[in-house]
Image: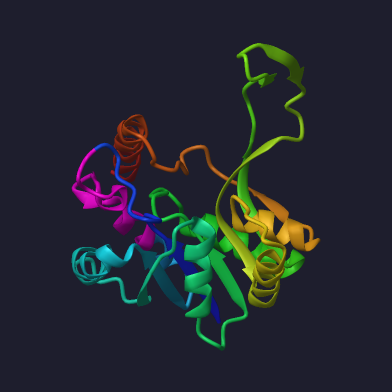
Amino acid sequence: MISAIIPAGGSGKRMGGRTPKQFLSLGNEPLLAHALRAFERAPSVTEVILVVPEAERDRALAEVVERYGLKKVTKVVPGGVTRQDSVRHGLREVDGRSDMVVVHDGVRPFVTEELIEASIDAARKHGGAIVAVPMKDTLKEVNAGGHILRTIDRAGFWLAQTPQTFTRALLTDAYRKADADDFHGTDEASLVEHFGQPVAVVQGRWDNIKVTTAEDLIMAEAILAVRVEVKR
C-alpha cells in the first residue's frame, strides 16, 4: 500500500492577495485540484493525505476534494508552521498498512502520474528517490556585498522537485533523528540525507514548476495552454 502526503499552503501563505495560493485559479480550477488529480490517476497510490492550514480545512474539503470527486483523499489534516511540521502531521495519519510514502507540493500543479510512478519505482529499489532536473544556468557564488566570489561548474548540480518518495520506515526514522538533533531541512530528502541514507534522483520535467509568485502563475497558465493544445 502506498500513501501520498500533499502539504498545501503551510501556514496559509498568500500571493499578494486574500486567496491562499493553493486555491488560486489555474484554467478555472484551483492549483491544488490539478496536483491532486494526478495522484487520483496514479495506479500505485492508494490514499492521499492532504495537509492544509487549519483555517482552510473546510474550504479544501468542499471546494477541492468534494467538488472534483477526489476519492483517494482519505483525510484533510491541519498543517504546521513549516513544511517539515506539515509533513510530520501527515505522516502520523498514514494508513498503518502503507509501506511507501510519496510527498508532493500541493502547488506543483503539473506533476504527472508517470513522474509519480517513476519516483515510486526508484524508491522501491533504493529506499528513497526524488524527482529533479539538472541545472542548466551558470552557477555563481556571491558574497554579502553582491560581488561574485567564483563560478561553479554546474555539472552534477540538480534542482530538487517533488514528488519525493521513501519507504515509510526510512522516512519515519529520518524524522525521529531530525527531531532528536533539532535538525531543520528544506525537504524530505535533506532529512534522509541527515539520517545518513543515500537518495536516488529521477529525471524530472522543467514544466513541473512550483507556483510561489505571480510570475509563476503566468507561466503556469502558459504551460496549461500548451498541454490543452497538445491533447486536442
- Residue 70 falls left or right of residue 105: left
Residue at 77% x, 23% y is 153
Front-most of residues 18 and 137: 18
- Residue 49 falls left or right of residue 190: left
Q: Is residue 162 above or below residue 211?
A: below
Residue at 46% x, 54% y is 105
Q: Which residues are magenta?
A: 17-37
The answer to whether residue 44 is seen in the rendering is no
Residue at 29% x, 36% y is 221
Where residue 63 appears, x then y in whole percent?
Answer: 19, 64
Extreme residue in the top direction:
147
- Residue 216 falls left or right of residue 90: left
Quadrant of the snapshot with the C terminus? top left
Where residue 193 appears, x then y in whole percent?
Answer: 74, 56
The answer to whether residue 37 is seen in the rendering is yes
Residue at 56% x, 63% y is 117
Front-most of residues 184 and 202: 184
Q: Is residue 189 above or below residue 94?
A: above
- Residue 231 falls left or right of residue 193: left
- Residue 194 lies in quadrant: bottom right
Residue 3 on the magenta span: no
Quadrant of the snapshot with the N terminus? bottom right
Where residue 119 appears, x then y in whole percent?
Answer: 61, 60
Where residue 67 appears, x then y in whole percent?
Answer: 19, 67
Extreme residue in the bottom direction:
97
Front-most of residues 116 and 97: 97
Q: Is residue 122 above or below residue 211?
A: below
Residue 35 on the magenta span: yes
